[in-house]
Amino acid sequence: MDTKAFIEAALREDVGQGDFSTLACIPYGKKGNAILKIKEDGILAGVSLAQDIFHYLEPGAVFNIMKQDGDTVYVGDIAFEVTADVQTILKAERLALNCMQRMSGIATLTRRYVDAIKDFRSEILDTRKTTPLFRMHEKDAVRIGGGCNHRMGLYDMVMLKDNHIDYCGGIEKAIEQTNKYLKDNNLQLQIEVETRNIDDVKRVLAVGNVDRIMLDNYTPAQIEEALALINGQYETEASGGITLENVADYARTNVDYISVGAIIHHAVSMDLSLKAQLS
């Protein structure tokens, strides 16, 4: 879902037939100012989306940015000031806050993981464990926090996971049929295969014709064993059971990527508020 379609749908959900609280007591055309106050330290994300929300409702709204996406912010900082019709400000307030709070929480947690492995070559990846219809913005927050995006959806990369492999009848058959399907349909997509043990890695290596091997729920010692077998022939990705406490142990193996679904689904929203500024 593109940004405009998301804003339209989100406002339709929230406003419905009308923002009657505002309509009841605020006259049309009354101008106002508001500031976005930071109430918790972290990494700011969603400023650009907030600007899009205000400008969708009122293209002429003046949006003055003090803190950019990706900035480290502290309690008491001001992220932006907006001047617009008061009805616009009040209608946009909750949607802008909800988005920014969620995105800033994700960016902040992502940065903690990225900082934890800054001395190693591995990169932090997100996953598809996202909020339906908000994925694009959650993955944007991951990038703002210094992480990298895995595939956006089921359409831009082939990932042969355990269920695909089991339903298909084995690793070899899944890889062979996938390569044939991509060739027959003239699709240029990378292929990643999930492995559950060292024997699975050996089977993938025997077949080849993939781009990345996922090492799912391996210990760091098992990762090292697998990497020795793979010997740089394919990209590698560690996944499963990875936390802030152990992520450096995985990065120390020099695996290419470390995927952490928790940077999105375990992120806690940052505390922010939009406050009226009265002259």
Image (cartoon, rainbow, N blue to C red):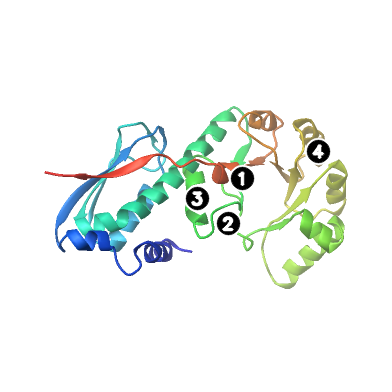
Indicate the quadrant where residue 279 lies.
top left
Name the secondary structure under disc 1: loop
Question: Amino acid under label 4?
Answer: Ala
Q: Residue at x 83, y 63 (%)?
A: 168
Q: Is residue 40 above or below residue 193?
A: above
Question: Amino acid under label 3?
Answer: Glu
| Label 3 neighbour load within 10 Å: few <14, some 14-19, many 20+ | many
14 sits to left or right of 82: right
Indicate the quadrant where residue 69 lies.
top left
Residue, disc 3: 138
| Label 4 neighbour load within 10 Å: few <14, some 14-19, many 20+ | many
Q: Where residue 172 appears, x then y in whole percent?
A: 86, 57
The residues bearing labels 1 and 4 have C-alpha atoms spaced at a distance of 22 Å
Observer-nearest of 266 and 222? 266
Task: Tell me which label, 4 or 3, sits earlier in the chain.
Answer: 3
Q: Is residue 182 above or below residue 83?
A: below
Residue, disc 1: 261
Name the secondary structure under disc 4: helix
Observer-nearest of 225 and 266? 266
Question: Amino acid under label 2?
Answer: Met
| Mark toward the viewer: 2 or 1 | 1
Task: Tell me which label, 3 or 2, sits earlier in the chain.
Answer: 3
Residue, disc 4: 226
Q: Residue at x 63, y 36 (%)?
A: 122
| Mark toward the viewer: 2 or 4 | 2
| Mark toward the viewer: 1 or 4 | 1
Q: Where residue 71 appears, x then y in whole percent?
A: 39, 37
Residue, disc 2: 152
The residues bearing labels 3 and 2 have C-alpha atoms spaced at a distance of 11 Å
